[in-house]
Image: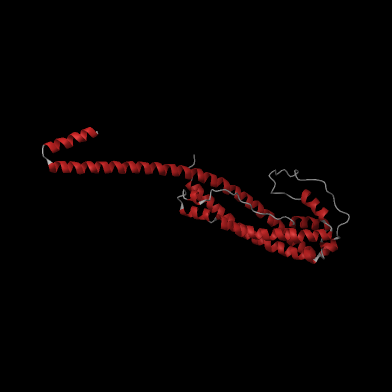
Amino acid sequence: MIKFFRKIRQKLLSENKFSKYLLYAIGEIVLVVIGILIALQINDWNEQRKERAKEQVLLYQLREDYRANLIQLEEKTATREKILVSAVALLKAFDYPLRAHRDTVIKHIAIIGNDPTFDPIQNDLNSSENLRLIRNAKLSRLLSNWSSDVIAVIEIEALWTKIVYNQLDLTTLELGIGRDLSNSFMNEQDHLWLLDKDENSSKIKIGKSKLGATLNEILTNRSLEGILGNAITMNKSANLQSEALRKRIKEILGLINNELIEQ
């Protein structure tokens, strides 16, 4: 091909047809430029195709992770709902002690001792390098803001955890009902956090204490009553934040599904 064009140029020069040679030279330059542009376009298409393939892999991974996050968040929310129900029931027992039963009160206190913490999957899928691959601007923005959205839930959870370990545990220790609470916790509760959901996997014989506080001593303990108020405030707030986060996850999953090319 190069020899062919060279012969044409030489023929035009030998015949002193300079104007035609000039037009030919311009035409040859145009052809070369067009060839370069086509090559660049093909290379650009190939790069885009590779990035779209990477995007699909990333989206599939993100979908699996956020599905797992959603399941965990809903389990933690359900646990907090149980804490709220028990806290309200215990406050009623404080107000109307003659209607209360010690075993029921112990069971509710054991439930209060839960401190559910949302621990989303940690990876580098939300890194700036990976987010660059995602073409959907809204999805990219939601993924970028994910960490800050989670903090709103985790901070409230941390406050309740401190109350459980620094106040509730101390109060129950002073009341001498630790054995009763452990017995109730291990044998009378559903443990949603267990990987093995077998209801009998956590059961163990502990028995009830003969040394613990009486029902009247429990229901006249000022520290315990104050902790119940905190239980309602903290866990209700955490669930309100969790509901907002749940909607965010559902929105992210919806956008991911829209962008996925199902195999």
- Give the color scheme: rainbow, by chain, secondary structure or one colour: secondary structure
Q: Residue at x 71, y 60 (%)?
A: 162
Is residue 114 placed above or below 221 in the rendered structure?
above
Front-lying residue, 219 or 179? 179
Q: Residue at x 14, y 38 (%)?
A: 13
Tell me, yes or no, if residue 244 can be seen here: yes
Residue that sits furthest to the left in the current view? 16
Q: Quadrant of the N terminus?
A: top left
**In the displayed structure, does residue 242 sit left or right of residue 107?**
left
Q: Position of residue 182 (x, y in %)?
A: 79, 52
* Nearer to the camera, 165 or 220: 165
Report whether 208 appears left or right of 139. Answer: right
From the top left corner, tell me how far across and down residue 47 is, in percent.
41, 43
**Which residue is at the far right?**
210
Q: How many marks?
A: 0
Which one is nearer the viewer's eye here, 147 or 179?
A: 147
* Residue 86 in view here: no
Residue 108 % position (x, y)? 77, 57
Residue 29 lies, in percent from the top left, at 23, 43
Residue placed at 71% from the left, 61% from the top? Answer: 231
